Image (cartoon, grey):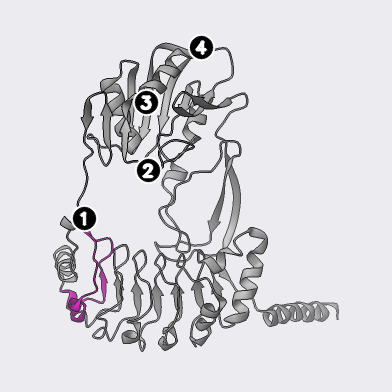
């Protein structure tokens, strides 16, 4: 439904997640929160004014799940309640491997006999998708076609990703398969060779050596063409999500002498560099890259007020102490795991807004009953924080002051 497929991650959340639960036996629970005010993309949401919880079940009452070990075929068969017979569907996913049963449970809930079919990295199946034999899928189709609860004469296949490619191959070569649904699949066989008898469909492969990254100079030229303005005169420059991605912060950045906000997020940058000429830079966005440390930020230490660097590979915070003007630091979903690194943030005299969720250190406190413990431990070490992971921090002295004020008003009223 639109409420879910249109979701985008908030600033403190891990990106590129799918709403996929781990089990068909329990519902997927989604907490829906309404925040005060409008939050632009990348910004922290306002205070929560209302919330509720939505449950989505993946198996209706009466649906049966049968673990399958039939010849070489592995998987799970989901049967609707009742005597049948039911239309049969083989359900496959992509190159993530393993057994994924969620869609099969939903199909059975809607009256289909659904076979969730893994083809590697499950039980005694091959661990990696090096090559595939269509005979395996042929045996699965024959098993489902002959099942007493399945209505013939043929069966259907639904696949996603690599599973979609296999669905097209099955309906092309196997007479048992009479319908196929391809979701996000390629029209050719890719990655792994597919064998059927004496025939082989070679897997199309890609060569990363032929890939060419976008340079900063090229990205700036595209930005100028799109915006009709010289980048050297602009106060805000957005170079995020370049295709192909930017890999290096090269010397062309030195032309951005008037830039106050620079976005280079969603690229493949590994190292912060060439910021020396950006004497007016206040906000720097480097989220969703491959950055491993904070070296290179010292060039903008006298002006930078906000650093957005979530979803990188940063484990150590060495060198951050030079960021004397930094007020906002969004660095969720990195690799910081020790309090010894976290306390380095206390050396930032103006830091007041921190997003740290998704780091291994914070994830130790990820359960709802430990959320307050995380806030308490973190703010004890960085006491100047006013907001942590989107939550306003209330200090003990402020609470006591508020209680005293309430008591004073009450006493005055009594008099």
Q: Which of labels 1 and 2 is toward the front? A: 2
Give the mark, 1 or 4, whose residue is nearer the N terminus.
4
Image: 328 above or below 46: below
| Rendered image: mark on residue 128 | 2
Give the mark nearest the N terminus, 3 or 1: 3
Q: Quadrant of residue 316?
A: bottom left
Label 2–label 4 contact, CB within 8 A? no
Q: Quick one: label 3 or label 4, which is nearer the N terminus?
A: 3
Sort mark 1 into few (<14), some (14-19) or many (20+) by Cα contacts within 10 Å. Answer: few
Q: Is residue 194 above or below residue 177?
A: below
How far apart, in angstroms, are the residues tagged by discs 3 and 2?
17 Å
Q: Is residue 168 left or right of residue 222?
A: right
Q: State the separation of the CA atoms marked 1 and 4.
A: 49 Å
SS state under label 3:
helix
The residue indicated by pointer 1 is: 208
Distance Cα–Cα, label 3 vs label 1: 31 Å
Q: CA distance from mark 3 to mark 4?
A: 19 Å
Q: Nearer the viewer, mark 3 or mark 4?
A: 3
Q: Which residue is mark 4?
A: 148
Does dot 4 land on a helix, a strand or a loop? loop
- Report which residue position mark 3 lands on: 137
Q: Earlier in the sequence, mark 2 or mark 4?
A: 2
**Residues under labels 2 and 4: Cα distance?**
33 Å
Count neighbours of disc 4 (C-alpha within 10 A) and say few if under 14, some if 14 to 19, many if 20 or more.
Answer: few
Range of residues picked out in magenta = 230-255
Is 110 located above or below residue 278 in the figure?
Answer: above
Q: Is disc 3 in contact with disc 4, using a CB cutoff of under 8 Å?
A: no
Q: Position of residue 366 (x, y in %)?
A: 59, 61
Distance from disc 1 to disc 2, alpha carbons, whole Å, reads: 20 Å
Q: Quadrant of residue 241?
A: bottom left
Judge whether residue 125 can be spotted in this image: yes
Image coords of residue 160 (percent x, y): 36, 36
């Amino acid at each position: 439904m639109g409420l879910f497929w249109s979701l985008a991650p908030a600033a403190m959340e891990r990106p590129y997640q799918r709403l996929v639960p781990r089990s068909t036996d329990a519902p997927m629970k989604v907490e829906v929160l309404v925040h005060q005010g409008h939050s632009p993309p990348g910004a922290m949401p306002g205070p929560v004014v209302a919330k509720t919880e939505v449950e989505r079940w993946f198996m209706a009452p009466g649906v049966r799940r049968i673990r399958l070990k039939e010849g070489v075929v592995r998987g799970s068969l989901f049967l609707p309640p009742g005597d049948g017979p039911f239309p049969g569907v083989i359900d496959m996913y992509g190159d993530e491997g393993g057994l994924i049963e969620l869609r099969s449970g939903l199909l059975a809930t809607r009256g289909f006999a659904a076979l969730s079919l893994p083809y590697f990295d499950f039980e005694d199946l091959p661990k990696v998708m090096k090559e595939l034999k269509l005979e395996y899928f042929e045996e699965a189709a024959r098993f489902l076609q002959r099942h007493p609860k399945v209505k013939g004469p043929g069966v259907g296949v639904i696949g996603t990703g690599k599973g979609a490619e296999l669905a097209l191959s099955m309906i092309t070569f196997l007479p048992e398969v009479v319908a196929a649904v391809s979701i996000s699949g390629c029209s050719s066989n890719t990655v792994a060779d597919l064998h059927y008898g004496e025939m082989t469909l070679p897997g199309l492969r890609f060569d990363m050596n032929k890939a060419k990254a976008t340079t900063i100079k090229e990205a700036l030229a595209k930005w100028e063409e799109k915006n009709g303005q010289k980048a050297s005169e602009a106060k805000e420059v957005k170079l995020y999500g370049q295709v192909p991605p930017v890999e290096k912060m090269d010397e062309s950045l030195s032309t951005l002498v008037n830039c106050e906000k620079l976005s280079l997020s969603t690229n493949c940058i590994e190292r912060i560099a060439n910021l020396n000429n950006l004497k007016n830079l206040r906000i720097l966005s480097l989220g969703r890259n491959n950055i491993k440390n904070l070296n290179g930020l010292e060039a903008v230490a006298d002006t930078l007020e906000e650093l957005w660097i979530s979803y990188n590979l940063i484990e150590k915070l060495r060198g951050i102490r030079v960021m004397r003007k930094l007020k906002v630091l969004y660095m969720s979903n990195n690799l910081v795991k020790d309090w010894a690194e976290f306390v380095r943030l206390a050396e930032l005299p103006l830091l007041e807004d921190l997003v740290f969720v998704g780091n291994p250190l914070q994830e130790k406190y990820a359960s709802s009953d430990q959320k307050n413990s995380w806030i308490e431990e973190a703010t004890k070490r960085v006491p100047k924080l006013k907001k942590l992971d989107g939550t306003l921090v209330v200090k003990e002295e402020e609470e006591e002051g508020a209680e005293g004020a309430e008591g004073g008003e009450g006493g005055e009223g009594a008099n």
